[in-house]
Image (tube, grey):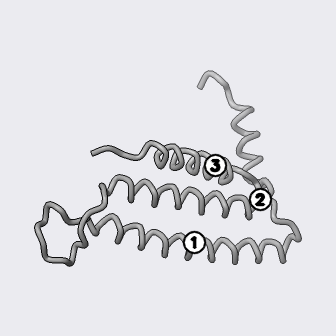
Amino acid sequence: MTANLTLLVLIGVLTACGVYLILERAVSKMLLGMILFGNAANLLIITVGGPDGEPPIGGGEPEGMADPLAQAMVLTAIVITMGLAAFVLSLAYRSYMLTTTEDVQNDPGDAEVAAQRDREDPED
């Protein structure tokens, strides 16, 4: 079995861009990163699923049939990604209505924990 090198490079670029955008502070960029990462994972599942074949419901020889599991998993992942996107959009809207910005700020509790860790003995 051989994989399409162009498709594998595209999966790598989508994954890298998705991870980069997930690490941003703006909620809209995080959402775009999650969508890109999800699409890269879907492409990877389809690529690993194997080459094209006959329809699985045709009733022919099992050797020439396509594997329907990869297609079913991608279809389920698409639905989950769209639900996640809708949820993050609703969180972004609620956050914007409360704070009038979409940037995620540092939590004061996290800053206190980081300062406490800096004060501790560095040898521990």
**Alpha carbon distance from label 3 to label 1:** 18 Å
Residue type at the position of mark 3: Cys
Viewer-side label of 3, 1: 3
Image location (x, y in percent) of residue 53 = 26, 63
The residue lying at 46 percent from left, 57 percent from top is 43
Nearer the observer, 88 or 36: 36
Earlier in the chain: of badge 3 and badge 1, it is 3
Q: Is residue 119 above or below residue 31?
A: above
In the picture, the quarter occupied by the N terminus is top left
Residue type at the position of mark 1: Leu
Earlier in the chain: of badge 2 and badge 1, it is 2
Tell me the SS state at disc 2: loop
Tell me the SS state at disc 3: helix
Q: Mark 3 = which residue?
A: 17
Query: Dividing the picture into quarters, in which one does residue 29 lie?
Result: bottom right
Residue type at the position of mark 2: Ala
- Tell me the number on the disc at residue 26: 2
**Alpha carbon distance from label 3 to label 2:** 15 Å
Tell me the SS state at disc 1: helix
Q: Mark 1 = which residue?
A: 84
Query: Dividing the picture into quarters, in which one does residue 50 lie?
Result: bottom left
Image location (x, y in percent) of residue 54 = 23, 68
The residue lying at 81 percent from left, 60 percent from top is 103
Nearer the observer, 79 or 64: 64
